[in-house]
Image: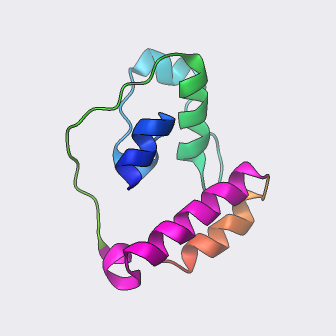
Amino acid sequence: MISMRSRLSRTGTGDQAIFVRRDVFDGLGGFPDLELCEDLDFSRRLKRAGRVACLRSRVTTSARRWSRDGVARTIVRMWLIRAMYLAGVPPARLKRMYADTR
């Protein structure tokens, strides 16, 4: 579901392995100094800067949270954090919510 969301929105997050050329990364100012959602902020700026490609290659990340909390609960919590960030909730507050998922 996360891969499908990323393909449709053309917006990825850190656990999906964002690859970008160094000159583009630097030109966009890199990752902002945020406590959480820095990957989402960067990904949104990247999307505004031009075309984003979603590769079909696979990456492996930790499944601890997914195994411990379950797929549905983890997806809902991550989407909630994302929605709250986009609605303007400060990243420091979201970080406390995210820490509860680890």
Q: Left or right of 50: which side holds 58?
A: left
| 28 relative to 51 in the view: left or right | right
Identity of the residue drawn at 58% across and 46% down: 38
Residue 71, magenta (yes or no): yes
Residue located 46% across and 72% down the image: 74
- Give the residue at the far bottom of this rendering: 68
- Residue 45 magenta-drawn? no
At x 38% / y 80%, what residue is drawn? 70
Query: Residue 53, position in %: x, y?
Result: 37, 25
Where residue 63 sits, quadrant-wise, is bottom left
Q: Position of residue 29 (x, y in %)?
A: 60, 26
Instruction: Identify which residue, 35 or 18, lies in the foreground.
Output: 18
Vertical placement of residue 34 versus 9, above or below: below
**Number of marks:** 0
Quadrant the N terminus occupies: bottom left
When the figure is inspected, residue 48 is found, relative to residue 42, above or below; the finding is above
Q: Nearer the viewer, residue 22 or 51?
A: 51
Relative to 92, is 17 above or below? above
Please, is residue 30 above or below residue 66 in the view?
above
Q: Position of residue 50 (x, y in %)?
A: 52, 16
- Magenta span: predominant SS is helix
Tell me which colouring the rendered structure shows: rainbow
Q: Going 36% across and 84% down the picture, which residue do you hit?
A: 68
The percent coordinates of residue 45 (x first, y second) are 61, 28
Q: Which residues are magenta?
A: 64-87
